[in-house]
Image: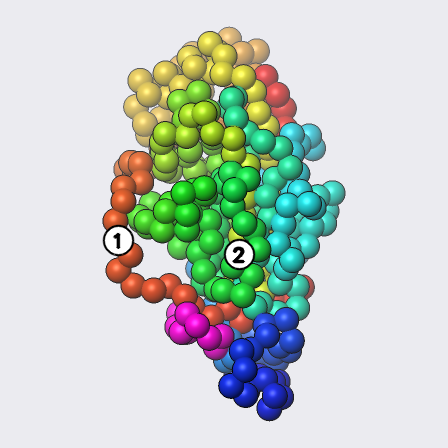
Amino acid sequence: MDSNVDEKQQSNSPIQPDSLRIQYSTSDLDSPISSDEDSINLEMINVKSKGEAFCDCHKKGKEKECTCGEEDTCFDWTWDEESKSHASFIKEGDREVMFHIDYSGGTAAVRGNTKLHKDQYYWEIKMTTPVYGTDMMVGVCTTDIDLNKCRHVFCSMIGQDSDSWGLSYTGHLQHKKNKQSYSSKFGQGSIVGVHLDMWHGTLSFYKNRKPLGIAYTGLQGKILYPVVSSTAARSGMKIIRCCSFPTSLQFMCCQVLRKVIPSHLDVLTAVELPPGLKEFLKNNVQWLLQPFPSSAPGPLKSRKRTHSEEDADGPGPNPVCKRP
């Protein structure tokens, strides 16, 4: 792939990512190229994740019109225009974010506008564009994270420090730079669910509304915010569900039911419930009562990184919450 860079940008002086204009092809490649951490590889390529989608719209060429899974119309929070990096652009009623709309020169991120500190919180992020590059991530963070610190660096931003906890599109968890395999990849059309239980201090993830198990523990007493990040040019994510509610006896009973009912069974199907209660639980906490996969991962354990994942990110494609 050829890049349109003039000779001045090829001098010994540091390259300014904001000045790059890169031409590209839309052909897909199966694996990214690697780049040195101290430089930007100008032969950037479009590498799309082959992760599972929630529906088949992208296979039918209908990804731009896809609204599958977007039934909710009420949202407890949106993305915060005042808490984002320079390469993040918020639209669609502050629910959708686009990253690097012209080209990518590093990592961009945006935070939610509501603090999460004492209740039960559940939200879903839909990958609205191809998913590729060094990393696209979802997770939570404190206010101490600098959302612009990696604007000129391609990296897995969420979880690089002690103030953020992230899940990569590659299926890896990251906190304090420690990575652990957690799930299969997700890609365009995937819905990533996040359950933050501040009563127990746990963070769990869902993929296409199927639970993946507890990812992190020990979050009690912290004040957290939803956060997403991306290194991929013209990449996008959208909030399609977000709700919160107090830790009630009713919710805790649902948690116990999920533990005592065999994990491969749907609680709402396995337990005989009055029609009204069943419909109520279906509308509000169905995400909690669904069957688990055959094996669910445990909490993140520390380990050393074995190799660098600082890959180049090229130009990308053209560009209702019912409460209990």
196 above or below 309? above
Magenta extent: 31-41
Which structural element holds mark 2? loop
- Residue at 43% x, 38% y: name it: 205
Give how far across and how far down residue 151 sits, in percent.
Answer: 56, 61
**Does residue 38 show up magenta in the picture?**
yes
Q: Nearer the viewer, residue 147 or 2?
A: 147
- Residue at 65% x, 58% y: name it: 86
Residue 23 vs residue 310: left or right? right
**Does residue 307 show up magenta in the picture?**
no
167 above or below 121? below
Give how far across and how far down residue 94 sits, in percent.
Answer: 70, 44
Label 2 neighbourhood size at 10 Å, few (<14), some (14-19), many (20+)? some
- The residue under label 1 is 304
Give how far across and how far down residue 55 sits, in percent.
Answer: 53, 48
Q: Nearer the viewer, residue 269 or 221?
A: 221
- Residue at 36% x, 31% y: name it: 217
Which structural element holds mark 1? loop
Residue 30 vs residue 283: left or right? left
- Residue at 51% x, 46% y: name it: 145
226 above or below 249? below
Residue 149 numbered tag: 2
Q: In the image, what residue type sits under mark 1?
A: Lys
